[in-house]
Structure formats: structure tokens, C-alpha cells
Amino acid sequence: MRRKIVAGNWKMHGTLAENEARLSQLVLELKSRDACDVAVFPSAPYLFQCQNLLANSIVMWGAQNVSQHPSGAYTGEISTAMLADFGCQYALIGHSERRELFHETDQDTAQKFAVVLEAGLKPMLCVGETLDQRESGDTMVVINRQIDAVLASVGIAGFTNAVIAYEPVWAIGTGKTATPEQAQEVHGAIRQQLAQHDAVIAESLQILYGGSVKPDNAEAIFAQPDVDGALVGGASLNPTDFIKICNAAG
Ligand code: PEP
């Protein structure tokens, strides 16, 4: 039985004061719960704040991005060792905003996935199609390609300690959610793709759905057999909504 995860991607939002209020509410209201894993992804300067406020809680934290280089002259970049210093358990890899706005390729994503694993952290690999790609019938062509790049880099064993987030680009921040059936169809196909390499690893891999998940649609999405939680953007900035989504996960 796979455990569900609800993860909040805060993107480039938050201040020390706002984060403190948000994190304190999460710690307090999720204190006695153990039904699903919970993680937050703040902007990098606030990882230290997460380490301080979340260290003895059930809430885990991670980075929204990481460099594929271990150290050196890479102005503005952050290494996996730095993330480990701040107690991160996860790093988001290949979010569609990184792919689109910062031109990250499948190969960059694959390298980042590999260095995150090497550092002992869990990559949360984001994959997903644009509306054009969906309408052209290419959803699984795109997703298979995104996952194949990572398989070529780390092999199927690399997915033993990783998470995949299926995030249709057309559903991110748009208020349009994939129907539970659309999510299930893609999640099932991702699991099948990986099962061709190793059925046991594929069966135990957590595959999250992301794209306009809210308190009122979470339960139906979580009811799908291959949906193991959610990566939540906008709604994760409101701790009351985020906690409702966590409660819907079990
Ligand atoms: C995201 O950015 O990963 C995301 C899923 O955003 P939203 O929930 O706002 O669509």
C-alpha cells in the first residue's frame, strides 16, 4: 500500500513573517496526524526557517530547484550539498515553469535528478504535457520522453527513492483541473512505462497529481488507484486549504 504525500510548492511567494504564520499553523494542526506525508517547498532563502520551525514536526521540506553542478563558478545556483545542509529531504526537479521559463531540457532534468539522488535527497520529478500536446494526442509521447531521459541517466533503480508528479501544464495555476479519470489514465500509463523496467519499483513509486488541486476537488482525485497524493501550488499558500487537502488524503 503506497503512502500518500501532499506537497506544497510555494513558488516565489512568502516573507519571513508570512511563512512563520503558515508553518506554525501547519505544525499545530497536523501535529497528531500520521495519515499521509506532508512537505513544503519554499523559496530557497527560507529553507533555514523551515529547518528551524519544522525540525520536530511531521512536515518535511525541500527546494524548488537545484544545480546539477557540485560547486564552482555558477552564480546564483544552489548545490545539493547546500540543500542537505538545510535539512531538505526533497528537491523538485523539472517543474514546468523551470522547463518553460528557464529553458531546462530533459537532459538538465536528468542530471539534476541524478545529483539529488547522489546527495541522499529525494527527487520529485515533474512531468506533463501542454494543451497543444494533449490536443495533438501526444500526452504520453511527451511524458514517456521526459521519464526516459531520467531512466537513461540513473536507470530504473533511481526511482526507488524518488517521486513523480504528473502536472499537466494546462492545469497549473489556471483553475482547470484534469478530471480524476484523466489523471488516472496518465498515472496508470506512467506506472506501466516504469513497470516495463521493474514491476516492483513501479508498484511502490508514489505518483502525485498537480494542477489546480483545491479542497473541493482533492478527494475525488485522491480516490483514483494510481494517484498517491498531490503537488499543490496556489492552494498551498493558504494553510487552511492546504490542511483540508492533507485531510482529504487520509
Ligand atoms: C504547481 O505549480 O506545481 C501547481 C500544481 O500549481 P497550482 O496548484 O496553482 O495549479
Image: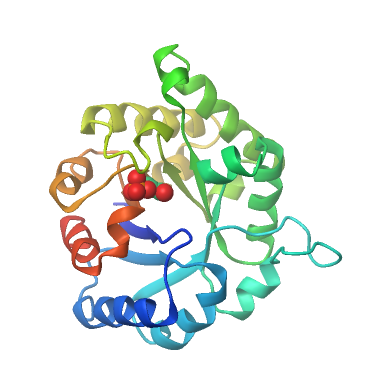
Question: Looking at the picture, how far across and down is residue 189, in whole percent?
Answer: 40, 27
Rendered residue at 43%/81% (across/down)? 16
Residue, far right: 73
Q: Is residue 179 above or below residue 8?
A: above
Task: Classify residue 131 by image quadrant.
Answer: top left
Quadrant of the image for the C terminus? bottom left
Q: Is residue 241 visible?
A: yes
Rendered residue at 58%/65% (across/down)? 121
Q: Viewed as shown, does residue 51 lie left or right of 212?
A: right
Q: Nearer the viewer, residue 47 or 18?
A: 18
How many numbered marks does the figure carry?
0
Q: Nearer the viewer, residue 241 or 106?
A: 241
Question: Looking at the picture, how far across and down is residue 144, in whole percent?
Answer: 54, 27
Rendered residue at 33%/65% (across/down)? 37
Question: Looking at the picture, how far across and down is residue 186, in whole percent?
Answer: 37, 29
Q: Viewed as shown, does residue 90 lie left or right of 222?
A: right
In this picture the colour scheme is rainbow
Question: Looking at the picture, how far across and down is residue 193, in whole percent?
Answer: 49, 28
Task: Classify residue 132 by image quadrant.
Answer: top left
Q: Is residue 11 above or below residue 49?
A: above
Q: Is residue 154 visible?
A: no
Rendered residue at 33%/78% (across/down)? 23
Residue, far top: 136
Q: Nearer the viewer, residue 155 or 249?
A: 249
Q: Viewed as shown, does residue 197 lie left or right of 246?
A: right
